[in-house]
Every structure is written in structure tokens, then in C-alpha cells.
Amino acid sequence: HHCPTGRPMLDDDFVDVESGSSGSREHGAEGGQLHRQISPRPASLHDSRLVACAVPSPACGDAPEAPKLEFAEFRRHACQLAEEYFLARDCRDMVASISLLGCPTFHDELASLLLRASMDRGDDTREAVVLLLNALVTDGLLTDPQMARGFEKLVLGWEDLQLDVPDAPGQLAALLSARVGLLDRGLFARLPEGLVQKLVVGLEPGPPREALETHLAALRDFKAGMDERLAEVLAGGAAENVVEWLNRADKASFHHEVVLGACLVSLDDADAQFQERRRVVLCLLSHLSSNYSLTDVDIQMGFSRLLGSLQHSGGALTSELQKNKRDQVTSLFRGAVEHELLPAEFLKSVRRMRFGGSEGVEVIRNVERQTPMHSRRVWGSGDARHFRQEVRESIVEYFDAHNAQELGRIVEELHLSDQEQTMFIRKLLVTGMERGEAEAALDAAEALLGRCWTLSEVRGAFVELRDVQEDLVLDFPRCRECATDMVFAAVGRGLLEQQDLICDGANIV
């Protein structure tokens, strides 16, 4: 049942927060009767990582995943299915419908969407969503990392969410109950300090409030000690001192705060100061990771919360300071990828789910461009449509700036296969014709010859251009004439040979 004032009501299931036990009473807390008729998995079987790092990064020869729908289209279909499910409550039919969408890559967003939609509704609807998500997990349609990402997206935006759902903190906490079984209940101890403070304020005096106050005090004490250790390291202290302190503190569930705190303390208005702090912080995090003081969950969640800090600081900073912070956060993420603290798959997932809002998306987009060697195509490793969008944007940027060297850098970062190189050149040529800038297209093709592609790939692009003419002519009536002119111009530039000019009517072979 909802609390009319939006003040969360938690019960004894939350008392043992230090060991990770969290939840809500079966009748009356946010999340209400979520637990009825649910058979959760044992907590030991949950994987709380946002990305499963054991999954191999895609290689150049691997075909990118190709969801049947565009991401926006998938979200639209998912919203429609959710509304139908809330009315019919047919779990098996809903699972079958989701499977037919053919977009398993996007099921992290599905989890977030379902949880968010249920928060505006009653206990029965929230229970139905939990049953559905558990069914998706059981059928292999939703992985633990996808579920964790869906939940983390809501946690990052809890302050904005609270404007529409006053009891959002309590509802989020209730999802971590052991009796719900969706997530590792140990995630309760990793909830942001501000969110936990909201839970405390909303509780009446009693054991649950006392337990949360004890937890909150322990978190604040840990962060205060952490700040002292980080200051010592930045002043030249040994990283091993931090390891020893972490062992003494014995608060493993707070270790993601070390990642977040180290990144935040490195930020500085002076770029030279930041660069030195960045170096020290990345070395520290690498050391803590190598000796297992930090787990994958700690590192991924720490950097996730760093993105969240961008979302919440935008209004408090001038545009210049915000840009400076964004650039420095970009540099920290780049270093984390280069030091192999974060997998490239993490970048793709959090960008698609818009962790950190528009600021976070901009950061990750820049990081992906700056870390080309850590995956086959860091921004398209899981989504063929996303990859094609990046190709289009790269080509449009070239025609706006006419900077062939910058285009070459982007092409190199894409790590295209031979077939994809040919496709890229063909799209470059077609865009040039459509914009009336055929010469600019040929300028780029010529400037990057030998650096990004070969004569064979250029010729293949012209062959593909001939093959798609019939499709292009519907929207571009002068396509054949422009293609013919471009072929002759290409011969003049040495991009094609005379023997390539075999005219067959209006077509160029």
C-alpha cells in the first residue's frame, strides 16, 4: 500500500542492512505484497555486475548482434506490451511476446521500463512485474547483469523519479528484498547515501530506523576515512596503505565508494593538476583491482555513479565548468578502459541506457572514440543498427567540416573489415552525390587511399554503387548521371582504371 505522504515504511526485513539483508514487510511497505507466490533464487546465485566481464570482447571477424528492431522502436513496442500485460496479467503470453520481438540485447532497458512503469501503480501490478521479470530470468531472456543495469538506471535517477513517485526510495529498496528474488540483496548496502537518508527520514522510531541510522553512520565514517587515505595517496603516500586500511575497515560493500571518491577527488579546475591526480588515481585503482581489494562490481558501480554525478551537477555549474568536468570525466573513463578496469561492453551498455543523462551520453561517446583498440568497434559491438548510425554520422561530419584527416582517424577507430570498408566508401560516395558534393567525396576517397582502404576496396564501392542505383533513383532521380560523372572523375584521379569503364546503356559497370 502506498503511504499517502510518500514517506517510506520499512519493516524488520531491513534491519540487517550490514549483511545485505533488505526488503519490506509483506503487507504495507513500498513494494507491498511483492513477495506473494514468488519463488526467488538463492542470493548466492545472483551476479551483481553491470557487465559480465568474462564474456569475450567481439573480434573483427564476429558479426555484430542485429536486433530485429531499432532501439526506439523496441521501447515503443515494449511500452505497448507492458500496458497490455498490466490489464491481462498473462505472464506466459507476455514472455512469448517479448521473445518474438527478437531484441535480447535491449532487455536491460525492458527491465528498467517495467520497474519504472510499475512504480506508478498498485501493489498487484508491482507483484505482476516481479513475477514477469523472474519468468524472463528463468527462460533465459533476462540476465543478471541486464537486471542489475535496469535497477541501476533507476537508482541513478532516483531524485528525479521522486518528483513523480514520492515513495520511490522505499519502492527501490523493497525490490532488494530477499523474498522478491530479483537482485542481490547486498545491493542495499550500495545504495547512494542520499537515498538511504530519505529512507531514514521516512521511518517512525523503531528497530528498522535504528538499523538504517547505524548503516548510514557506518557509511559516512567509511567515506571520511576514505577521504583521508585518498588525500595521503595524492600527497605521495603508498597505495598499499589504502589496501591495509580497507582490510581493517572490513566494509567490502562500500568499496565502490572508493572508486567514485577517487575519481571525484581527482577533478580539478587546473588541467595540469588534474592530469597528475588522474595518473595517481588510475594507478591506485589498478593496484586495488590487481590485489582483489576492488571487485568488478565495485569498479563498474563506482564509474556508473560517476556518470550519475554529471546528471545531478549540471544546474550547479557554469557551462564552462560543466564542460571542464565533462572533459575530465571523459579522461578518467578513457584511462579506466586503457588500464582494463572497464570493458568496452560497459561503455556501449551505459550509453544506450543513457546513464548520466545527456551529459553521460556525451562522455561515453567521446570515450568510445578515444579508445579504439579495446574492442572491434567499441560503439557497435552489440548493435548493428547503432554501428550503421555511427557510420552515417561520421560521413555527415566530414561533409560539414571537409576534414579528411579527421575522417581517417574515425575510420581507423572503427576497425572495419574489408567488406565494411567497401560499404563505408560506397556510403561516402552516395552522400556526396546527394549533397551535390561529389568532388568532396572523391577528395576523401583519394586522401585516405593507402591509409584506410585499398584500390580494390574503392573499386568494390563503385560496383556496389552500380548495384544500388535502382533503389536510389526513386529518391534521387539524377543518380545514374551523377554516378557516371563520378566514375569518370575517379578514373581521372587514379581511383579507377580505364578498364573499369564498361558502359552498358545508362549503367556504369
Image: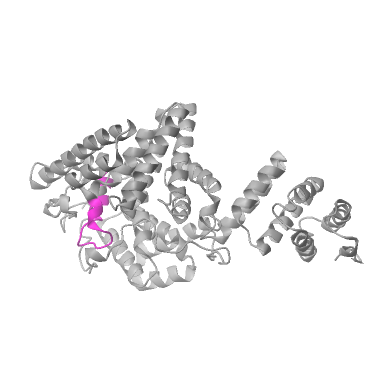
Left or right: 161 as drawn, with respect to 431: left
For the residue pair 116 and 274, the one nearer the viewer reads as: 274
Q: Magenta residues, as a range?
A: 166-188
Queried whether the magenta region covers residue 187, the answer comes back as: yes
Which quadrant of the rendered structure holds the C terminus?
bottom right
- 471 shown above or below 257: below
Residue 483 x %, y %: 83, 56
Q: Please report the residue visible at 23 percent of the width from the left and 61 percent of the height from the top.
A: 180
Q: Residue furthest left?
A: 206
Left or right: 156 as drawn, with respect to 245: right
What is the basis of the colouring in this image? one colour
Queried whether the magenta region covers residue 442, the answer comes back as: no
For the residue pair 97 and 380, the one nearer the viewer reads as: 380
**Residue 92 quadrant:** bottom left
- 126 shown above or below 236: below
For the residue pair 50 and 296, the one nearer the viewer reads as: 296
Q: Please report the residue visible at 57 percent of the width from the left and 67 percent of the height from the top.
A: 63
Q: Is residue 88 visible?
A: yes
- 224 shown above or below 386: above
Q: How many marks?
A: 0
**Residue 418 quadrant:** bottom right
Residue 86 x %, y %: 35, 62
Residue 58 x %, y %: 51, 63
Q: Is residue 5 visible?
A: no
Residue 504 x %, y %: 91, 68
For the residue pair 64 and 11, the one nearer the viewer reads as: 64
